[in-house]
């Protein structure tokens, strides 16, 4: 955590541009909205000068903001974690209090509010299982202190208020005096009604139609499990997955899947307690997972169970028998299916835990030949220290996968890059990365190519070849009959044995979006402006590259050398947002207006800014909220002197 300022009043000196440069345009705009909506709660200052508060978002987040030597930083329990809209809202809430002359409580670092909140931050992004377990134990201790009559009163009272609790207790009562068959039949009957509701459910309705509710079934499954009848749940689990498979393709938002998933959680809790032999429990779990084509099952702990080596071997034997089935029909795993890959992964895990690791690589080799899964084999070979053999399979895998599975081919190439990096064979690494750029020209591959080329002192030559390719489509490598004959840059880089000139990306030059991205990345304002002007000239160019080129990033990159062009870009962006007539768009537009203001004032054109602002106000004089936002633009500091 950064060292904090001793005086929270240093926040008073902040300018709007400070927030903008720190958190970005969107987060600043959203932070303004959050503060105006009163979402900041319990704001306090620490004795060391930071701000702490709770902020209402999707849930309640703890946010802490620091200011040291004019630089803002923050931590937050939200998914973003730092430099977020919640932190912006906290700063603005603090400044609002100061401007109103209201005191902010100052607390010490030992205050319970800080301790509780920082503990919450430390646990952000985790499952919270430890806290839940701790809370459950404390609750159990409390219940154990109650008299039997008190417990009866509590349960009776709440069973009247909670239908599911009442259902659970009635089933437990019935199961205490009879076998579970009647209740099982009742559950199947209830499921039939729910499936009928599901068939009639309008998956495409936007009217908020109620989703069929499986929560009562979940409660009844729990009552059966808690009464000591886990076996009875396994068939129900199979039926749930089979029936969901019939309607899953229509359940695009996963609403029914979520309902089924909660029921399956109970089934997976029942599985370890069932009377099945351990290896058959494993087979049952695998069958359910293979039915889960739409990923509705939650993560469960079954596979972390304490199984013996012999149990893993029995499971592996069953999987090998299944993989040997050929033809078509039930239970046959097709070569190209994800199910076959999943079964093989489970088999390899079972062999390893069963003490049969010597079988793993031969099986992986057979599967690579049969299904094209070279990645698994290469990982196993590298893990066992067989680097030379791994390289041989990488070459075979890249050549076999490049056309049908380009993603796999790229991953194999990355493995080869990592091997050569460990060997410090930087010339070969540079050749691989350069080939990859010409195969898939994008900013990420350009940066990797630059890093590799820098290690061999050949960046300028390689860079020029790459830019020529993007400008005019000229490939540096000549046509060759085989990959073994080709080098991507003859006399500069070695042959890798993987270059086939026919596999290189055919581009339509100039590649304007990538040329602009490279210019921005290299801080070359001249090139950025040149290619931006070309982009504007191209037919539908701006629309075509809308998702890959950020005009705001272009403006930020060129504002120092070409302020007038940057201002024109920001004007276009701001005015487009205003036309949407939404408050959130006005807030975002204000960030662009502020950039226009600061840029024009920095080049001595304050009058031009004031005239433009007046024009915007006049055109939009009926948009009251926009005018309020524009009023803030007259203030450099967030609060006055």
Image (cartoon, rainbow, N blue to C red):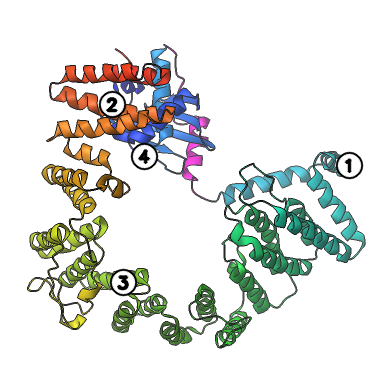
Q: Residue at x 83, y 50 (%)?
A: 167
Kindly indicate the quadrant of the structure image that contains residue 135.
top right
Separation (CA) of disc 1 from disc 2: 69 Å
Check disc 1 and report the residue beneath it: 149
Closer to the chain start, of discs 1 and 4, is 4
Q: Position of residue 317 (x, y in %)?
A: 59, 86
Check disc 3 and report the residue beneath it: 415
Separation (CA) of disc 1 from disc 3: 67 Å
The residue stretch that appears in magenta = 101-126
Point out the image quarter for the N terminus: top left
Separation (CA) of disc 2 from disc 3: 47 Å
Closer to the chain start, of discs 4 and 3, is 4
Q: Quick check: is 111 in the magenta stretch?
A: yes
Q: Nearer the viewer, residue 109 or 294?
A: 294
Check disc 2 and report the residue beneath it: 593
**Which disc, if any, is residue 1?**
4
Closer to the chain start, of discs 1 and 2, is 1
Choose mark 1 or mark 3, whichever is in front. Answer: 3
Q: Secondary structure at mark 1?
A: helix
């Amino acid at each position: 955590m950064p060292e904090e300022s001793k005086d929270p009043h240093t926040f008073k000196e902040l300018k709007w541009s400070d927030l903008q440069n720190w958190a970005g345009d969107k987060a600043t705009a959203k932070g303004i909205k959050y503060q105006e909506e009163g979402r900041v709660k319990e704001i306090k200052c620490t004795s060391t000068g930071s701000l702490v508060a709770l902020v209402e978002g999707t849930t309640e987040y703890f946010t802490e903001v620091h200011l040291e030597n004019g630089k803002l930083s923050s931590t937050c329990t939200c998914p973003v974690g730092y430099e977020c809209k919640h932190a912006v809202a906290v700063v603005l809430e603090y400044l609002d209090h100061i401007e109103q002359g209201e005191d902010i409580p100052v607390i010490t670092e030992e205050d319970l509010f800080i301790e509780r909140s920082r503990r919450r931050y430390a646990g952000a992004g985790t499952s919270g299982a430890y806290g839940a377990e701790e809370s459950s134990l404390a609750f159990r201790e409390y219940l154990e202190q109650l008299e039997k009559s008190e417990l009866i009163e509590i349960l009776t009272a709440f069973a009247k208020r909670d239908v599911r609790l009442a259902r659970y207790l009635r089933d437990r009562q019935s199961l205490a005096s009879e076998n579970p068959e009647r209740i099982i039949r009742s559950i199947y009957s209830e499921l039939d009604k729910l499936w009928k509701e599901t068939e009639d459910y309008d998956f495409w309705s936007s009217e908020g139609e109620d989703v069929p509710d499986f929560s009562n079934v979940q409660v009844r499954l729990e009552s059966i499990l808690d009464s000591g009848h886990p076996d009875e749940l396994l068939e129900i689990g199979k039926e749930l997955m089979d029936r969901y498979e019939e309607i899953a393709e229509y359940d695009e938002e996963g609403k029914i899947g979520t309902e089924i998933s909660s029921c399956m959680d109970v089934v997976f809790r029942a599985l370890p307690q069932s009377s099945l032999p351990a290896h058959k429990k494993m087979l049952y779990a695998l069958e359910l997972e293979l039915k889960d084509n739409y990923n509705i099952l939650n993560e469960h702990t079954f596979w972390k169970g304490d199984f013996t080596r012999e149990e893993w071997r029995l499971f592996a034997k069953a999987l090998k028998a299944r993989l040997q089935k050929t033809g078509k029909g039930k239970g046959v795993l097709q070569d190209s299916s994800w199910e076959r890959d999943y079964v093989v992964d489970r088999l390899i895990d079972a062999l390893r835990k069963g003490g049969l690791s010597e079988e793993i690589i031969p099986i992986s080799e057979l599967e690579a030949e049969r299904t094209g899964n070279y990645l698994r084999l290469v990982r196993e070979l590298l893990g066992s220290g067989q680097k030379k053999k791994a390289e041989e399979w990488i070459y075979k895998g890249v050549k076999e996968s490049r056309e049908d599975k380009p993603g796999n081919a790229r991953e194999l190439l990355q493995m080869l890059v990592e091997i050569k990096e460990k060997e410090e064979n930087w010339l070969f690494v540079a050749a691989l990365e350069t080939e990859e750029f010409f195969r898939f020209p994008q900013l990420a591959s350009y940066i990797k190519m630059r890093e590799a080329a820098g290690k061999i002192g050949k960046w300028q030559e390689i860079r020029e070849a790459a830019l020529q390719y993007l400008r005019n489509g000229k490939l540096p490598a000549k046509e060759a009959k085989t990959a073994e004959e080709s080098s991507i840059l003859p006399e500069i880089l070695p042959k890798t044995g993987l270059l086939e000139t026919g596999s290189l990306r055919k581009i339509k030059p100039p590649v304007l979006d990538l040329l602009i991205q490279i210019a921005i990345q290299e801080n070359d304002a001249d090139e950025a402006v040149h290619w931006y002007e070309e982009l504007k000239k191209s037919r539908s160019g701006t629309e075509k590259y809308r998702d890959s080129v950020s005009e705001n990033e272009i403006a930020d990159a060129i504002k120092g050398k070409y302020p007038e062009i940057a201002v024109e870009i920001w004007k276009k962006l701001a005015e487009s947002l205003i036309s949407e007539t939404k408050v959130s768009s006005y807030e975002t537009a204000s960030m662009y207006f502020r950039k226009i203001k600061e840029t024009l004032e920095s080049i001595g054109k304050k009058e031009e800014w004031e005239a433009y602002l007046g024009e915007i106000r006049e055109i939009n004089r009926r948009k009251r909220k926009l005018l309020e936002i524009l009023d803030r633009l007259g203030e450099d500091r967030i609060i006055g002197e």
